[in-house]
Amino acid sequence: MAYAMGKISVIVPVYNVENYLDGCLESLVAQTYQDIEIVCVNDGSTDGSREKLRQWAERDGRVRVIHQSNAGVSAARNAGIEAATGEFVCFLDPDDRFLPHACEEIHATLSSTGADVLTFSATYISASPGPLWLDDALSSRDVDYLGFSIDILFKEASRPFVWRMAFKAGFLAEHELRFDESLHFGEDQAFCFAVYPRSSHTVFSSKILYEYRVQRPGSLMDQRYKDLRSKMLEHACVVECVYADWERLGILEQYCPLMLSWGLDFVLTDMLRAPQDDFAVIAQRLSGILCHFFSEDTLGQLDTEADRSLAANLFRCPQAPLLSRKRAAWRFFRCRYGRRLTLRWLLTRFYLSSS
């Protein structure tokens, strides 16, 4: 496919956001860099979003609208990627905003460096304090990586939000990179783990280009705090997808201790407040994934006794008693984050889930 050189395709997945859509699109048409196309994918909205999109398309010729039956944010983003004609591709969620110079910075950085991937910084707006990890997750430092380094995923602020990233369209096409439409929570995380190992040149920028709205009522992020069991099961699916992809790439074995530890952390971050029945279901699911991709010999390579204890309990599931697994999980988080931070984190999660 021939891409329009210099053009940036901004993909906006839209679903029932009529109260926020004007602010989102206003931030795009007001960009200091004007050579953009705004690809809005209406994912079966049932509110006034469809009409607003029609009005915006009439107002500004750079706004293109695609309509589809409701299939989820991953399908909407994939439809946007397929329709994009620009040399560069990035994403904007419909309740968020780009800062005025965002596209100018994206174009300048990707054009001057030739990088496949740019990850920039963001700020957020929220009626209440955001999650404890959010400030760090949104703040990149200025650094370039030629080829893949595991530090990209575990030492840089590289994930889990794809709207902090911009890509060469040709890079996405070459590697057939798309969002997994079977995932409803954590699809960004899986996409990040697929993108970075395939990138020949990745640039991180400390410049703040994006304004993120934390936990809009009715958003997926808001729903995930209210459906803990579904969230953890979906996160288990994300881990399984990432492990399978890295196994196909031939790099899972090379990084197996780190990836095993990440999988434990990612799936079980909410398990300490999970009801007993939910905990047992999640432990059983994760146990099956770990036993498929790793052997018990991997346990000896984990960094801490807490990691080894939790992993051992999961490998032995369902034989390991539930209380033993919960105690192992508590030791895992206390060792990783400290007792005080773990308790603070649990209280924050409880507040978010009950508010």
Image: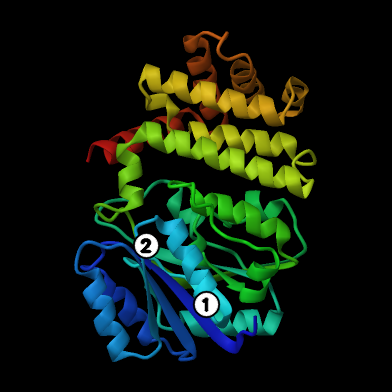
What residue do we see at 55% from left, 87% from top?
Answer: 7
Q: Which disc, if any, is residue 183? A: none
How packed is label 2: few (under 14 Cα within 10 Å), some, or many (20 or more)? some
What residue do we see at 49% from left, 31% from top?
Answer: 268
Q: Amino acid at mark 2?
A: Tyr
Pick out the residue farthest to the front: 69
Nearest to N terminus: mark 1 or mark 2: 1
Circle 2 residue: 124
Give the quadrant of residue 32: bottom left
- Foreground residue among 142 and 77: 77
Q: Going by the image, does 88 lie left or right of 186?
A: right
- Foreground residue among 242 and 165: 242
Percent across and percent down for residue 283 are 51, 22
Percent across and percent down for residue 349 are 35, 37
- Note whether residue 99 is visible: yes
**Quarter of the figure that contains the C terminus:** top left
Q: Which disc, if any, is residue 84? A: 1
Q: Amino acid at mark 1?
A: Ala
The number of numbered discs placed on residues in the rendered structure image is: 2
**Quarter of the figure that contains the N terminus:** bottom right
What residue do we see at 66% from left, 40% from top?
Answer: 243
Q: CA distance from mark 1 to mark 2?
A: 27 Å
Marks 1 and 2: which is nearer the front? 1
What residue do we see at 38% from left, 18% from top?
Answer: 277
- Note whether residue 22 is visible: no
In terms of secondary structure, where does tag 1 sit? loop
Q: Are marks 1 and 2 in contact (CB under 8 Å)?
A: no
Identify the image's colour scheme: rainbow, by chain, secondary structure or one colour. Answer: rainbow
Percent across and percent down for residue 122 are 45, 66
